[in-house]
Image (cartoon, rainbow, N blue to C red):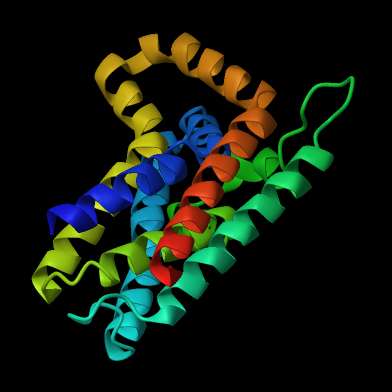
Amino acid sequence: MGEAIGAVLPLAVGVSLSPIPIVAVVLMLATPRGRPNGIAFVVGWIVGLAAVGTIVLLVSGGAGAGGSGGPPVWVGVVKLVLGVGLLGLTVVEWRRRPRGEDAALPAWMSTLDTVTPIRSAGLGAGLAAVNPKNLLITVGAASAVAQSGTSVGGEAVAFAVFVVLATVGPAFPLVVAVVLGDRSRSLLDGLRGWLAAHNTAIMCVLLAVIGLKLIGDGITVLA
């Protein structure tokens, strides 16, 4: 189980530091229903990650990813594909970066002042499980757990560690708001502005590093 937890730690950090979900929670907290929406968003985020991981672990278990003879060839292929996919997203994100102007936030963020907790939960689940970057990384994390050869209980614990660490980023603004109350406003506004301004750079670094890691893992399995 220790090997599985070690394998998912860097992947969890990559998901946790996603700027857009953090900015979304910060913006939600500035609305009249800020805290209920923020809590619902984080819950949806956790459910989204858990759903993807559960599906991958079930499929991988049925395909023998954690057999005693070592990971099968398909595990290495999957890791290679995921790694190449993340590098491809890196190129796309970099080419789309704003030039000579402030980075624009997604249009849906302008409607956050009218969202309900149910919609907030849906947004959290969508950004966790449907967003291509987070989806690829989460699949990679679940695949790493599946190939570790640990027990079913160990797999559950290892992936639960991944989910908890991957939730630290989106949950951070909510914790700050609860602990500091009204004093958190200036801090969170500064965090939102910094993340919005450096969103592309942060994303590209995370995608490139994790993509290269998955490619390296895939080559190791195939070799």
Expressed as whole percent of the image width and height from the top left, the position of residue 131 reads: 58, 58
Q: Tell me where residue 173 sits by quadrant.
A: top left
Nearer to us in this view, 78 or 157: 78
Quadrant for the N terminus in the image = bottom left
The residue at the point 52 percent across, 57 percent down is 215
Expressed as whole percent of the image width and height from the top left, the position of residue 168 reads: 33, 37
The residue at the point 47 percent across, 49 percent down is 213
Expressed as whole percent of the image width and height from the top left, the position of residue 13 reads: 39, 40
Quadrant for the C terminus in the image = bottom left
The residue at the point 11 percent across, 73 percent down is 151
- In the image, 97: left or right of 58? right
Q: In this view, does 157 lie above or below 58?
A: above
Q: Which residue lies furthest to the right in this view?
A: 100
- In the image, 165: left or right of 185? left
Residue 96 visible, this orientation? no
- In the image, 66: left or right of 134? left
Residue 14 visible, this orientation? yes
Nearer to us in this view, 93 or 163: 93
Nearer to us in this view, 195 or 91: 91
Expressed as whole percent of the image width and height from the top left, the position of residue 65 reads: 30, 80
Nearer to us in this view, 155 or 24: 155
Q: Which residue lies furthest to the bottom in this view?
A: 62
The residue at the point 77 percent across, 49 percent down is 92
